Amino acid sequence: MSYADQIFIQNCRDILSKGVWDTDRQVRPRWEDGTPAHTIKLFGVINRYNLKEEFPIITLRKQYLRSAVDELLWIWQKKSNRTQDLKSRIWDAWADENGTIGKAYGYQLGVKHHYPQGDMDQVDKVLWDLKNDPGSRRILTSLYNHHDLSEMALYPCAYSMTFNVSGNTLNGILNQRSQDMLTANGWNVMQYAVLMHMMAQVSGLEVGELVHVIADAHIYDRHVPVVEELLTREPYPAPKLWVDPSVTDFYAFTVDSFKLEGYQAHPLEASKIPVAI
């Protein structure tokens, strides 16, 4: 089985056996019928993925790498908050009358600041540091800017990425305030694993560890039966990730720059998973 499957299985078992329900309080999320969407949660989950050994993708249910990369590029490359710039429709429910998600995600990465090296946004500063000052302990991005939160359609879930170079190896820490284990865990992990590969390749570095820190790892009440069914499945081995070796410019990557070799996964139609908003 893939290591991502092992971690997912253990996380879900820990949440279901040791987690705390929030049914004793009012909650913001709702199901489509207006019913409160309650969760069982575990606080402070930390997972480590060695990207040198395998690509962390879940096989217990099929994951769609192209859609995940499309959203990753929308945020990190296009630095966009316009839902029309995204091929999938996963952000439509959060769009305002102007078709944006406000000052969230890509918008934050695209704001330029003045540095001694010139005016750069957060992504370009990371790229500059990895090439010119890889020993720095200040290479990070943050999407959680308090002065803009009131103008965001949704507070960022995955809000901070810290990059750290050891020797010639690029490691990273993804901080996440909230994680819907069924719908988002596999999605976020493979997205940021791809980002690590991108950053390493264009910086002349080897990819290393991705550490995923989750403050609130939870399973929604209506997701529990689906998760329990997933836990009975036999996982497949991890596939290989192919990254186009000719790409040396971060902004030259496309969804076609990444392919999975030998990916097998169990089916699970997204339409069968209730969505809380």
Image (cartoon, grey):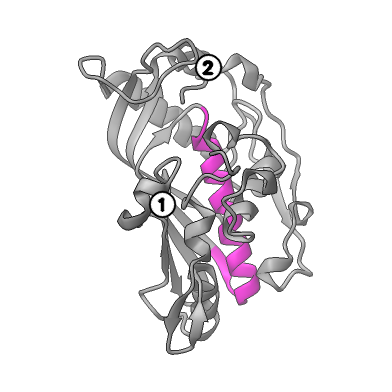
The correct choice, above or below, for 195 with respect to 277 in the image is below
* Depth check, front residue: 60 or 253: 253
Residue 152 position within the rendered picture, expressed as x and y whole percent measured from the top left: 43, 46
Residue 258 falls left or right of residue 36: right
Left or right of 35 in this view: 41: left
Question: The disc labelled 2 sits on which kind of residue?
Answer: Pro
Question: Alpha-carbon neighbours of circle 1 within 10 Å: few (<14), some, or many (≥20)?
Answer: some
Residue positioned 36% across, 15% down in the render: 36
Instruction: From the top left corner, tell me how far across and down residue 161 is, in percent.
Output: 43, 59
Identify the residue shown where x is 42% and y is 72%: 139
- Name the residue: 41% across, 36% down: 179
Residue at horizontal 63 percent and vertical 22 percent from the top = 270
Can residue 52 be seen by looking at this rendering? Answer: no
Placement of the N terminus among the 4 image quadrants:
top right
Per the image, the residue denoted by label 1 is 159
Provide residue 198's location: percent of width, then percent of height.
63, 63
Which residue in the rendered view is the most extreme toward the left?
24
As measured in the structure, the alpha-carbon distance from the residue carrying label 1 to the one carrying label 2 is 24 Å
Residue, disc 2: 274
State yes or no: residue 194 in magenta.
Answer: yes
Per the picture, the main secondary structure of the magenta-coloured stretch is: helix
Report the front residue among 221 and 225.
Answer: 221
Identify the residue at the far front of this view.
97
In this view, the residue in front, 184 or 146, is 146
| Figure quadrant of residue 136 | bottom left
Label 1 sits on a secondary structure element that is: strand
Secondary structure beneath dot 2 equals loop
Q: Looking at the picture, how far across and down is residue 140, in whole percent?
A: 41, 67
Q: Nearer the viewer, residue 154 or 183?
A: 154
**Badge 2: few (under 14), some or many (20 or more) residues near its Cα, within 10 Å?**
some
Give the total number of marks visible in the rendering: 2
Which residues are drawn in magenta?
183-207
